Amino acid sequence: MIGIATTFFWIFLIAFFVSAVYSVKDLHFDFGEPQMSLTADNEMVFSLPVSITNKGFYNIGSFNISTEILDKEGFTILRGSTFIPVINKNDVATITHNMTIDVNDLLQQDKNYLFNDTELKIYEAVSMRIADVIPVQASTNLSMPWGAPLYNFSLGEPAYAPYNFTHFRVTVPISFENHAFFDLVGDMRIRMYNSTGARVGRGRTSLEAYANSPYNGFIEFYVSMTGTTPTGRFEVFFSTSTFDYGPLVIPYG
Amino acid sequence: MADTNNDFKKKVRNFTFKALKATVKGILVYGIYFVLWMFLAPVSEMVPGFQQMVETFVMVYIALMIVGELTSGTIFQYFFSVAKALFVIGYLIFSLNGGILGLTFQNVSLMVDLRLFLAIAMLLSLLGLAKSVLQAINYMSEKAEYPPI
């Protein structure tokens, strides 16, 4: 009797295992192109469209996609996951794995994201329970280029032109390349300090740099003739739709 | 003289019957393996060494089964039955790496958790092992109870 029961269970176990493994053949994943976009709230959204076609014999349980974005040093910038409790057999599940990044938070961690291009590491893991009982996990490491919105930002040498008896009109060239995937629209404010640290002038200009394009412009403001020295420093503040940053200190002279 | 001749004939007939039974069982198990392999074949393309692993298992299992069948009616039948159960336990633990299978191809790491499957297979094998041990004890007891006169 034990022999019959054991044989029955063996047959059941092997048949179940083989059919579950065979079912994997009829499981198709279609990962779309990962995309980054900007929401109306100026948050960056990382989207990964995924389509799962389950033509196997069993349901797929606890389907989970998790993504971790890390910087070059391996510190976690963002972690997120998308969970589907059940994907029924002969069913197609289409989901978009979304993760939101607050650019201001990102820049608070490291201002290099503003000025330097870098590579972000992405750890992607997909886990599921085949036939609801066999846990399977597939993971991979990818890298994604990060384009700095103010790449190679520089201010040229200030050019002084007499405005009246007491003030100069100062023109400072601005140049950078927007390597980011989003357009940079906002304001740039500048404060000019002389060599003793006294503020001699300030100005504001609007910025409009399209994604993946260079920007060349200038800012004009007025400074007092008496306080102006050949050397000093600029303090630059950015206030854009995506982020706020400042002061960026750039010496001149 | 006639008794000895009959005895020999009986032994030959018994052995032929056992050999036939063992052959049929062996062919049956190989047939099942052959059918199941058609389903598992796609996996062997992804998992290197999978076919060799399964083939080795089936070969040794069939060999132990045939030898066990040929020695049926003796205490060795139970020895081979125990050996078969121990082989299944040992081979499953060894080949399934304790239930966690890890594979890497290209840049993708795959991890399959077969601990539940392994646990059930272990339990069934242990049941078979216990059954064989009990049968061996029973066999020895019967021998002891009815000593040949």
Image (spheres, coloured by chain):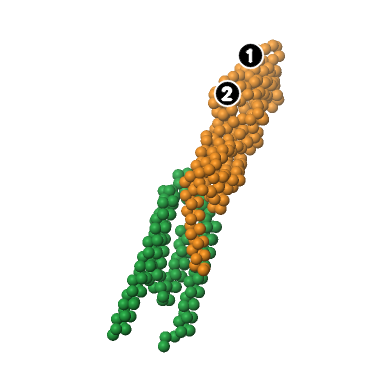
Chain colours: A orange, B green
Residue A137 has which mark? none
Q: Residues within 10 Å of mark 1 (few under 14, many from 20)?
A: few
Residues B37 and B73: in front is: B73
Res. A156 visible in picture: no
Left or right of A106? Residue A27 is left
Tag 2: residue type?
A: Tyr
The amino acid type of the residue labelled 1 equals Ala
Tell me the element at label 1: strand
- In percent of width and height, residue A245 lies at 66, 30
Q: CA distance from mark 2 to mark 1?
A: 31 Å
Circle 1 residue: A161
Q: Which mark is residue A210?
A: 2
What residue do we see at 61% from left, 19% from top? A218
- Look at 40% across and 61% down and name the residue there: B28
How many circles with numbers are drawn on the protein?
2
* Figure quadrant of the C terminus of chain A: top right
Give A73 or B128, whichever is nearer the viewer: B128
Above/below status of A81 relative to B51: above
